[in-house]
Image (spheres, rainbow, N blue to C red):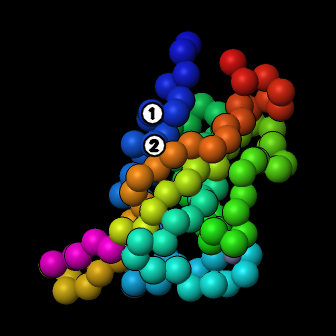
């Protein structure tokens, strides 16, 4: 099975809604981030399941470049992204989404075994 990998994950993360309204908080230092900010996000997928979930978001200052603790049974990614403000016309509100995704690091379900 070839890596359904990077391209699929970038696609899954593009447009992912983050934060509340027009602001997202850095997981680590709680800095408020808005449209145009460059962020790093952590995403994972449980082996055998399809949906990718984004669980953490870091600002530039707390830049994360590698997955620190690989978790058994999970695919994990760190990706760089920019925040885009998207209008929800139906609800007359705005929300932040991820765009310009670039995968920084990737871990397979078993540590040290990327294939
Ligand atoms: Zn931060």
Closer to us: 96 or 38: 38
* Quarter containing the C terminus: top right
Horizontal and vertical percent position of residue 99 = 39, 57
How many numbered discs, if any?
2
Horizontal and vertical percent position of residue 46 = 64, 41
Is disc 2 placed on a helix, strand or loop? helix
Residue 58 lies, with reference to residue 41, above or below; the image says: below
Horizontal and vertical percent position of residue 83 = 43, 68
Left or right, 55 with respect to 69, comes to left
Q: Which mark is residue 91?
A: none
- Mark 2 surroundings: few (<14), some (14-19) or many (≥20) residues within 10 A: many
Left or right, 103 with respect to 71, comes to left
Assign the magenta stretch its main secondary structure: strand
Tell me if residue 37 is in the magenta stretch. Answer: no
Magenta extent: 85-89
> In which image quadrant can residue 64 be found?
bottom right
Left or right, 111 with respect to 103, comes to right
Residue 4 lies, with reference to residue 30, above or below; the image says: above
Q: Residue furthest left?
A: 90
Closer to us: 74 or 64: 64
* Image marks 1 and 2: residues in contact by CB distance under 8 Å: yes
> In which image quadrant can residue 47 be found?
top right
Q: What residue sits 19% from the left and 86% below the top? A: 92
Q: What residue sits 60% from the left and 60% below the top? A: 40
- Read off the residue under disc 2: 10
Residue 107 in sight from this viewpoint: yes
- Mark 1 surroundings: few (<14), some (14-19) or many (≥20) residues within 10 A: few
Q: Which mark is residue 7?
A: 1
Disc 1 beta carbon < 8 A from ligand 1? no
Quote the CA–CA distance across marks 1 and 2.
5 Å
Residue 60 lies, with reference to residue 5, above or below; the image says: below
């Amino acid at each position: 099975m070839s890596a359904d990998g990077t391209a699929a994950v970038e696609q899954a993360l593009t447009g992912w809604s983050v934060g509340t309204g027009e602001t997202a908080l850095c997981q680590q230092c709680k800095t408020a981030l808005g449209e145009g900010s460059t962020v790093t996000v952590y995403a994972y997928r449980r082996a055998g399941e399809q949906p990718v979930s984004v669980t953490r978001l870091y600002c530039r200052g707390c830049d994360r470049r590698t997955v620190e603790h690989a978790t058994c049974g999970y695919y994990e990614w760190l990706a760089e992204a920019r925040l885009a403000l998207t209008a929800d016309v139906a609800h007359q509100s705005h929300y932040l989404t991820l765009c310009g995704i670039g995968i920084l690091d990737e871990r397979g379900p078993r540590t040290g075994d990327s294939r």
